[in-house]
Amino acid sequence: MADVDDGAAAPVSEPLDLVRLCLDEVVFVKLRGDRELKGRLHVRSPSPLCTTPRILGDVEETVYVVEEDEDEDSDETVKVGSA
């Protein structure tokens, strides 16, 4: 799963162990609808002013759109955009 050389670290036996090992690392998250997120994984407790915890920081979103050419059935164009 993950190659982490941390002599005293326990092996990854649960999914949350892998999340813990990836804190402060850049991760890729694949979403439905041909979307991907890339950002730094961290966990912050909600502040009194904001009740939503922040999990990803410095996030870049990529959306893939496939358009079929109406003139020719076999041609497809892939457009990549960032949000």
Image (cartoon, rainbow, N blue to C red):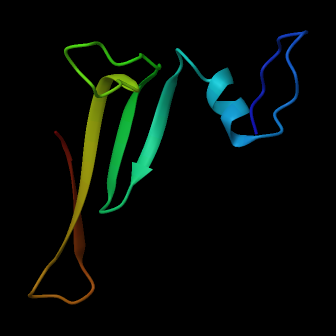
Q: Decide: is 44 above or below 78.
A: above
Residue 50 place in picture, x, y as percent? 22, 20
Q: As drawn, which residue projects farthest toward the front?
A: 48
Residue drawn at 35 percent across, 39 percent down: 37
Residue 58 place in picture, x, y as percent? 31, 19
In-image side of 23 versus 65 (left or right):
right
Residue 7 place in picture, x, y as percent? 90, 9
Q: As drawn, which residue projects farthest toward the left?
A: 71
Task: Write down the quadrant of residue 11 in the picture.
Answer: top right
Residue drawn at 62 percent across, 30 percent down: 19
Q: Quadrant of the C terminus?
A: top left
Residue 78 place in picture, x, y as percent? 24, 61
Q: Quadrant of the N terminus?
A: top right
Residue drawn at 72 percent across, 31 percent down: 17
In this view of the protein, which residue sits in the foreground, 37 or 78?
37
In-image side of 67 versus 7 (left or right):
left
Q: Decide: is 18 above or below 9.
A: below
Task: Write down the quadrant of residue 21 in the picture.
Answer: top right
In this view of the protein, which residue sits in the foreground, 61 or 52?
52
In this view of the protein, which residue sits in the foreground, 15 or 47?
47
In this view of the protein, which residue sits in the foreground, 73 or 14?
14
In-image side of 9 versus 83 (left or right):
right
Count of numbered labels shown in the rendering: 0
Task: Write down the quadrant of residue 46 in the picture.
Answer: top left
Residue drawn at 61 percent across, 23 percent down: 22
